[in-house]
Amino acid sequence: MKVLKQGDIYAPEHLGRKDILIEGSRIARIADHIDEYDRIEEVEKVDLGGRILTPGYMDIHVHITGGGGENGPATRVPEASLSVLVQNGITTVVGLLGTDGITRSLENLLAKARAFNEEGITCRILTGAYGYPSPTITGSVERDIALIDLMVGVKIAMSDHRSSNLTGEQLISLATQARRAGMLSGCCGYVTIHMGSGKARLDPLFYAIDNSDVPVQKFLPTHMGRTRELFEQGLEFVKRGGTIDMTAGLTREELEETADQILSYLKQDPEGLNMTMSSDAYGSAPRFNEKMECVGLTYASPKSLHEQLKVLVCERGASLERVLNLMTKNPARVLGLNGVKGTVAEGADADFVVYDDSMDILHVMAGGRKAVWDKEVIMKGTFEE
């Protein structure tokens, strides 16, 4: 058991100074003061001294087995490391494939996810990749989601020269399979749609919601800040009940541009309930010329999520509560984990981030365990130094 004392709690709603009792991996109690354990030596007490405490970050778009490869085998991105994720406040991830659904396998993705869960964080995965028909483990998207415990949805690419130029009818079929499988397995069963900068933009998605009975909430288009036109279509999708996912900026210019887009969205939806934000960590960030030839390549980092939060809150004056929604409460809703993840509440998982006075990450807890403490990484992968 542990008692965290006098943290300034953003749950993400601001609760003020509270004590938190942790039993095992869950939050057992939250109160103004929890003093009855003060004299019990076996109960660890941690005085947070009024520092801000938030839910652990939920990053729902991470290439945990590495992405890339658009410029040949030497450009394959390395796998994610546990220590880097927790160092950046991330305690829950959704792993997925990208452009390469051939040399990067779903079997490896599943094994990596199971390793993360054993090592201390929460990981779920998506079947599929950029291409269509989708690569699977069992032979069908529906069977993957229904039969594999960590599989909660499917990934596909759209309006991108690396995609299979998915039609609206094909998207309806894919989403129907994911939804039906989710119903059978008790998971969310959703479709993450990688959005490129192609001319069709969200047109196949609008076709799908106009010509099917699949709930709009089952679609999550991502990288929605890629172009101004795509972002504007995304705002229309939000008005129709959908949720869009923004990718945190990798460079200073991208951090500023993404901040502009998120703030413009928050003017329309002050609560910020129909947007999520993810890092695309370990996914490649290739640059293509007008002939669609790869002329440069880097890859995204988990650190961009917290960096984007700091730009929005510390530099642009956005509400911490609203920005936290994008990476805690809203992803938990997408994944069907309300009340368990993305919140500081009794009965929820004890996943926390604690900031120092500069809003840098000081402590991280995952499932009640110290992952980062006084900025020192404690939770590491099995073979990490």
Image: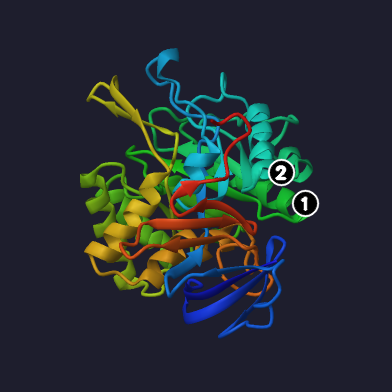
The residue that appears at 58% across and 44% down in the rendered structure is 379
Q: Which residue is mark 2?
A: 145
Q: Quadrant of residue 308?
A: bottom left
Q: Position of residue 96 (x, y in %)?
A: 56, 37
Type of amino acid under label 1 = Ser
Q: Quadrant of residue 40?
A: bottom right
Q: Which residue is mark 1?
A: 185
Residue farthest to the bottom, as pictured: 32
271 in relation to 277, above or below: below
In the image: residue 180, left or right of residue 71 = right
Type of amino acid under label 2 = Ile
Q: Are marks 1 and 2 in contact (CB under 8 Å)?
A: yes
Quarter of the figure with the C terminus = top right
Q: Residue 93's mark?
A: none
**Is residue 281 visible to us here?**
yes
- Sequence-wise, the earlier of marks 1 and 2 is 2
